Image (tube, rainbow, N blue to C red):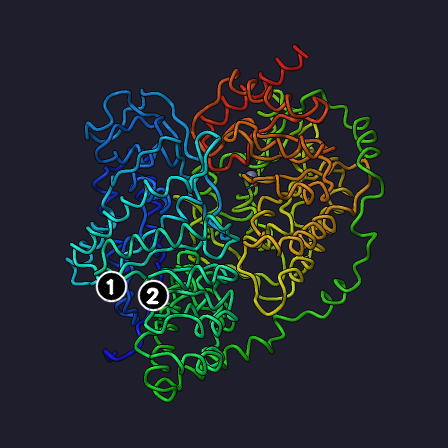
Amino acid sequence: MSGSNIPVATLGVPRIGRRRELKFALEAYWSGESSAATLLQTAKALRAANWMEQCDRGVTKIPSNDFSLYDHVLDTAVMVGAIPAIYGWTGGELLLDTYFAMARGGRLNDASPACGHGRHNGHGKGVRALEMTKWFDTNYHYMVPEFSADQVFALTSTKPVDEFQEAKALGIHTRPVILGPLTFLKLGKPEEEGFEPLELLPRLLPVYEQLLDRLAAAGADWVQIDEPALVLDLGDQERKAYKQAYEKLAAAVPELKIMLATYFGGIGENIDTALCLPVAGLHIDLVRAPEQLEEIARLARKDMVLSLGLIDGRNIWRADLQAILDRIEPVVGAWPLERIEIASSSSLIHAPIDLELETGLDPKLKSWLAFSVQKMSELSILSQALSGGRASVMSELKASSEAAAARAASPNVHNPAVRERVSGITEEMKNRASSFTERHAIQRAKLQLPAFPTTTIGSFPQTAEVRRARAAHLRNEISRDQYETFLKRETEAAIRWQEEIGLDVLVHGEFERNDMVQYFGEQLSGFAFTKHAWVQSYGSRYVRPPIIYGDVSRPRPMTVDWWKYAQSLTEKPVKGMLTGPVTILNWSFVRDDIPRSAVCRQIALAIRDEVTDLEKAGARMIQIDEAALREGLPLRKPEWKEYLAWAVECFRLASSGVEDSTQIHTHMCYSEFNDVIDAIAAMDADVISIETSRSKMELLDAFRSYSYPNEIGPGVYDIHSPRVPEVAEITNLVELARSRLSDSQLWINPDCGLKTRKWDEVRPALVNMVEAAKRLREAA
Ligand code: GLN
Ligand code: ZN
């Protein structure tokens, strides 16, 4: 490609490897099967492959330090030495195992952490993981940095410099990516109340200066500093802090040019702040906020490089390149061409890697898609069209517009019966027959549960054996019958064991489910599935989101037989277990040709049918998981109301088709509830289970101050960590819950499903949990 082309940038690319190499390397290391050296070798090979691939596909601004072994926010915390005291770090380079302890909890040696030897021997003291939460409104999760009031920062890792040099050794000149100081502080939390992380900025900046200095010394000419927090609602103090910080950073190392990257939305009212910063370049997201181009182009300094985020970094749809060109050419024409860059809207880590691996996908659908590497090519074509004229890439441009037209006209996408049903939705369909108080009395009489009823969230460990059986069945090595016999045995064993340890409300264990969304999507119309399209959810956990390409409907019951089988084995109630419409939506790649709310209503009707079928089959309790309800919240507050209104409506639509006596449960993962408590109450679930153990029940404050009337199971066991909680630890947590809620509201359950844990961890943990409930009942 010619040197005069407009530069092409990805802001970061997937780290996990086409064949999930990183996951397997991490797991092998954690289980003790392989050494740290092997893990680091795999990581290095993945980085090299990513750099080469980008070169090959015409990316010219190649990122480095976009790689992470676990999480880039954790890397940033480590880089600046924000390592809480509990991890026993006393300075110097951080041990790999301490890094993983921050990520996952675990055991740390009491011995000097700086002694440099390999793996910890497991005899040290147990230590919790950092909290984990969503990265903006994506399905990626980061480790929440913790700051103490007397926080000292120091450059503790030179990862950005090391990886820049690693690429340089391969002959590739990269633009290192670092998380900006303001977004970093905003994503963190104070260890104790009483100060704002932002106050730490003056202490943090010298570390960033030092880093920029080292990058420049290593030969970097540009650095990409990510400040996605610029698309959030910011206060005056925060805006001022941007100015202070970037004036300082730009002046400290003037030879290093800063490309300030904003993404996941428009800069909106932060525009003055963003445009007055003394940076050499600004990246803007023109997929989420195409409307901001004109204003920014009008107001920005003309000596600034504008990086145009034109290709969606977060979705899988192929772009209509001609439509993009039509839109931007007039604006771009007025900007010096040598100061334009073409980029993905955000880092590509939220997209799967390579569409070409999907050999089983319907060719028509496939022609409508683009994954990370295809997006690189799209970027390159846009750059060529802008630099050399459309004629230079006419056939590529035509192909992309033809694909867009074919998709819009395809009968696979449009189902008139579904549209008709959605338009026939009535108010009555969104309301239970009676109020919670009335339902509560009816359910109490029918269910006869003890005080502090115990239950779990649904899934039991997906053991290697379970996964092997599923894989063997997929490859037709075992028949459907054999597979089902196996699953029945697992389910039966789980039911028997739950009875034995004395749980009150049982679950069937979800052994037949590959994933809580995929399992449903595979049985619904309008969904497609990929084989290799993994994206990172957190650490070594990757997901393969379904693709919702067309109108959604439920051809037949999806879970009723499994529920029936499980219930046939026991007198105790077994919960029907479903994934809610909002979660199915938020964990899928969603079609972009109709509003998300419209897609969600279609899914809600399908789930509603399943709920009523479970009730007909005899289910006394049905849990509709809305793990991801909060995830769909728009980044800016003024847009929340509209989202929450349709999200709650969809949950109610899915759950309200049952009798008063049928108890509807819901479950939500790690969430702050304060700001959405109205919506949670409006969902009107009879019982909600939530993650609360890591926040030591602080998350319940929202329910207390709201006087939330319905029942609640605050999680008493952190399932994200392999650590087994002691009975006393659990009773202590329940006591904290009792200080906030009335006993009659409380259920006892883990934070979330147990599928990622091992039976060796789950068994003693749940035995302790049941024992804790027993002691509470005795003492009450
Ligand atoms: N029922 C699901 C399970 O137990 C819920 C998981 C979740 O909320 N993430 O796995
Ligand atoms: Zn959960």
Given residues 50 and 733, the one toward you in this image is 733
Q: Is residue 81 left or right of residue 746?
A: left
Res. 389 image quadrant: bottom left
Q: Secondary structure at mark 2?
A: strand
As drawn, 212 above or below 620:
below
- Label 1 packing within 10 angstroms: few (<14), some (14-19), many (20+): some
Which disc, if any, is residue 52? 1
Amino acid type, label 2? Gly
Q: Quadrant of the N terminus?
A: bottom left
Q: Examine the image and state in which quarter residue 624 appears.
A: top right
For residue 318, above or below residue 92: below
Q: Position of residue 361 (x, y in %)?
A: 48, 66
Is 52 left or right of 476, judged from the image as shown? left
Tag 2 residue = 281
Q: Nearer the viewer, mark 1 or mark 2?
A: 2
**Local SS, label 1:** helix
Q: Quadrant of ligand 1?
A: top right
Amino acid type at circle 1 is Met
Residue 367 vertical position relative to residue 168 in the rendered view, above or below: below
The residue depicted at 59 percent of the width and 76 percent of the height is 408
Q: Residue furthest bottom?
A: 391
Q: CA distance from mark 1 to mark 2?
A: 25 Å
Q: Nearer the viewer, residue 541 or 673?
A: 673
Viewer-proximal residue among 331 and 45: 331
Question: Do the residues bearing badges 1 and 2 touch, measured as CB atoms within 8 Å?
Answer: no
In the rendered structure, the answer to whether residue 604 lies left or right of residue 135 reads: right
Q: Where residue 58 sits in the image (x, y, percent)?
A: 29, 72
Q: Look at 32% across and 85% down and name the residue there.
A: 388
Looking at the rendered image, the quarter that the C terminus falls into is top right
